[in-house]
Image (spheres, rainbow, N blue to C red):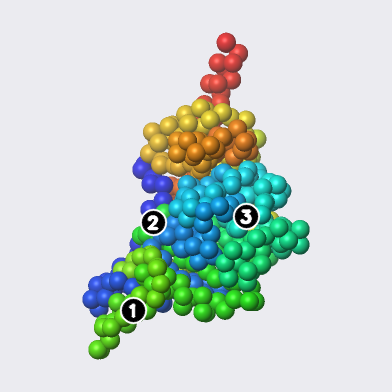
Amino acid sequence: MNIPFSPPFIDQAVINEVLDSLQTNWITSGPKVKALETEIIKLTGSQAAVCVNSWTSGAIMMLKWFGIGKGDEVIVPAYSYCATALCVIHCGATPIMVDILDDLTLDPEKVKSKITSKTKAIIAVDIAGLPCHYDELQALVKDPEYQNIFVPTTDRQSSLGRILLISDAAHSIGAFYNGLPACLKCDITIFSFHAVKNITTAEGGGICLNLPPGFNNQEEYSFLKLFSLNGQNKDAFAKSTGANWKYDILFKGFKMNMPDICAAIGLAQIRQYNNTLLPLRKKVFQKYCNSFRMFKWFFEPISKDHNRESSYHLFPLRIKDITEAQRDKIIEDLVNKGIIVNVHFIPMPMMTYFKSIGYNMEDYPNSYKQYACEISLPIYPQLSDLQVEYIIGAVIEAVQTITAVEEVAKVLY
C-alpha cells in the first residue's frame, strides 16, 4: 500500500471553479480572490480578510504595515517552520526565540521573560491546528507593566499602544477558542493556503484583521490591498473595465497579491470545509487516538480542551521515552511500508542558518524534546478506513519492534 503524506483535496467542484477562471479568461487577481476573502470572513467572523500569495508574504507585509524594522524585536517560538522567524529578519528586525509547552504551543511564561522596550510584536504559532493560549497572551500584551515599556515609533504603533499580537495560523483555519473562531483572539491572524494545508490555493495565504477600536479595519483592508500590489491604486481587473487604464503609485508597496486561478481552488474547498472536509479530518484524528490510547508509549495530542479545539491539520504522534535516533528508525520502517510521514518541526535553532547567527538549541530544551519523539502521520479527507487501519497497524508494529530491539541491546551491552 502506498499512502502519501498530504495530497491536496481536488474534487469536481474544485475543477469546475478553476475551469470557470480559465473560461472567463481572467486568471490574475479579480472576482475569485474577492469571493474567497468574503468566504474567509464568513468562516472566521473577522472584520476583514486579505488574500496574498503566501503566508510568508502576508507576515512580512503585516510587520512592515506596523512599522517594524531595524532595532525592533519580535518574539517567536523556537519550534516552528523557518518562515516564522525569516519574515522578521526580512524586515530588518530580530526574532527573539522562546521555548514551547508540552502541547507544542508558545509558552506565555517564557514570553514574559523576553519582553523589552524593543519588543514590537509576538508571533504565536498554532501547531498542528491547536490554538495557542491566547487568553494568557492577550492578558500579557494588555498588562500595564508591559504597555508602559512599549515604545511606539510609528502612528500605527501609537494607535495600538502595546505589543501587536499576531497568530501564525498556518495550521489552524477552522480552529476554535472559547466557542468562537480562534482568529478572533488576535489583532492579526495569518493563514497559509499552501498545497498541504486544510484549505489550499496551491500557494497562498490569507490575513484576517481584528484590530481593536482606534483602527478602522475596512480602511486598513483597502490600504493592504494596495500595499500588496506595489502601492498601485487600481488592480488589473479594475483597469480592464472600459477606458480605465490610468493609474497611480501611491506609496512603496510589494507584489504579493493572489491570482484568481489560485483563489478558485480555495474557493471551492472553503465552501465544503465546515460540513465535509473538517469533519473528515477529525474522524481520522479520533481513530488514531482511539487505537493508540491503549499503549503506554502514546503521548496523546490535545485536540480539544476547556477552551480550545483544533482544526485537525496534523496528527503529531509522540512516542514516550524514545530517542531521536529511535524515532528516525520508526520513520524509516513506516516509509518502507509505503507510508509517507513527516516531522513537525525541526526546531529553528537546529538549522544551519539560525545556528550561524547565534541561536543555540540548548536554550530550548522542550522544543528539542518534543521534536525528537514526534512523527506527523497522514491525516486528510481522502484517507479511506482501510488506509487508516493500515497506518495504525504499521505504527504499532514499528514502535514495538524498534523499542524492543533497543531494550535488548541495552541488556546485552
State yes or no: discs 3 and 2 in contact (Cβ < 8 Å): no
**Seen in the image, is 207 located left or right of residue 303?**
left
Q: Earlier in the sequence, mark 2 or mark 1?
A: 2
Q: Residue at x 37, y 59 (%)?
A: 203
On the image, numbered disc 3 is attached to which residue? 119
Q: Secondary structure at mark 2?
A: loop
**Mark 2 burial class by Cα count in 10 Å: few <14, some 14-19, many 20+:** some
In space, the residues marked 3 and 2 are separated at their CA atoms by: 33 Å
Residue 88 at least partly seen = no
Amino acid of disc 1? Asp
Amino acid of disc 2? Ala
On the image, numbered disc 2 is attached to which residue? 195
Query: Residue 81: image x %, image y %?
Result: 49, 47
**Tag on residue 248?**
1
**Tag on residue 94?**
none
Q: Earlier in the sequence, mark 3 or mark 2?
A: 3
Q: Residue furthest top?
A: 413
Query: Residue 265: image x %, image y %?
Result: 36, 67
